[in-house]
Amino acid sequence: MKKISIITLISILALTSSFFGKDSKEYGVFIGREKNKVLRLKNYNVLVVDAQYLSKKNIQCLRKNNNKKVYSYLNVGSVENFRPYYSQFKSITLGKYENWPEERWVDVSKKKWQKFILKKGKALKKKNIDGLFIDNADVYYNYKKKKIYKGLTVILKSLKAEKMDIIINGGDAYVLKAIRNNHPLKYIDGINQETFFSKINFKRKKFLKQNPKTTAYYKTYCRKAKRAGLSVYLIEYTKNKALIRQISKFCRAKGYRYYISSSVELN
């Protein structure tokens, strides 16, 4: 067998690095980033943005930037007062959203909300996104009623019928019940869990380490989700290098994708 020269080996390694993309990043979530900065994002395997503020051409630009899959944020369980449609649904809101004063929980059992969300999902699909990053399924945790569970299920199944991937952010109470009720769980593709290892102190505006009991609960939850065939993603908020190393090591061992943000606004 011929020996490979050092120069040849270096050339092969350089080509391999270039082929796979040495700057490739597994997962990034930038739902609060300004449009002009979003359009400069590159080399993500899974990229989450708020495509409600982007055009089909913008999504095409993100693909040209070597972003493999592009998902859009979609809030299905609450409504923010800065959205242009807030006044249409204020009457069916259920209550205040803790730590987010501009937001209120929505009664997802209402047909007009379900139709509205499906319409938004279809509009996003036309922009050529790969899937949806569904936020605030925690409405079921806060209002644990049969009609809320059923309403969420109607919304998620209708969105999945549009042939998009569905990742649920949070919503563990809903997801665990859905896993128990549906084997296999065909209308959800993955879950995202925030603050698994980290914690946000909103009053002091600081990032802290999550308490061990909560982390243990999330470990069990994510294990059950993976066992049910769901992909698992984490978002952590920290600047602590030791904690970042711990998160990275854990996720690599478990096969979870993760994103670490230094901003609670994910910008």
Image (cartoon, rainbow, N blue to C red):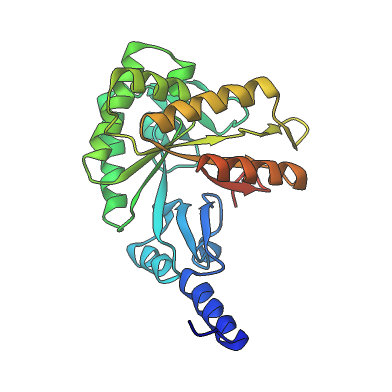
**Looking at the image, which is closer to me, 121 or 48?**
48
Place of residue 156 in the rendered image (x, y in percent of width and height, measured from the top left): 30, 33
Q: Is residue 225 left or right of residue 4?
A: left
Determine which quarter of the picture holds residue 194: top right
Q: Residue furthest left?
A: 161
Residue pictured at 62% horizontal, 85% vertical? 6
Place of residue 52 in the rendered image (x, y in percent of width and height, measured from the top left): 40, 51
Q: Is residue 191 left or right of residue 24?
A: left
Residue pictured at 54% horizontal, 52% vertical? 30
**Looking at the image, which is closer to me, 231 or 9?**
9
Q: Is residue 256 left or right of residue 164?
A: right
Q: Is residue 143 above or below residue 124?
A: above
Q: Is residue 155 above or below residue 110?
A: below
**Looking at the image, which is closer to me, 73 or 173?**
173
Q: Residue furthest top?
A: 145
Q: Is residue 1 visible?
A: yes
Place of residue 266 in the rendered image (x, y in percent of width and height, measured from the top left): 59, 48
Determine which quarter of the picture holds residue 182: top left
Q: Is residue 93 visible?
A: no
Residue pictured at 55% horizontal, 50% vertical? 32
Place of residue 213 in the rendered image (x, y in percent of width and height, measured from the top left): 66, 20
Q: Is residue 3 left or right of residue 60?
A: right
What number of labels is visible? 0
Q: Is residue 209 above or below residue 150?
A: below
Determine which quarter of the picture holds residue 97: top right
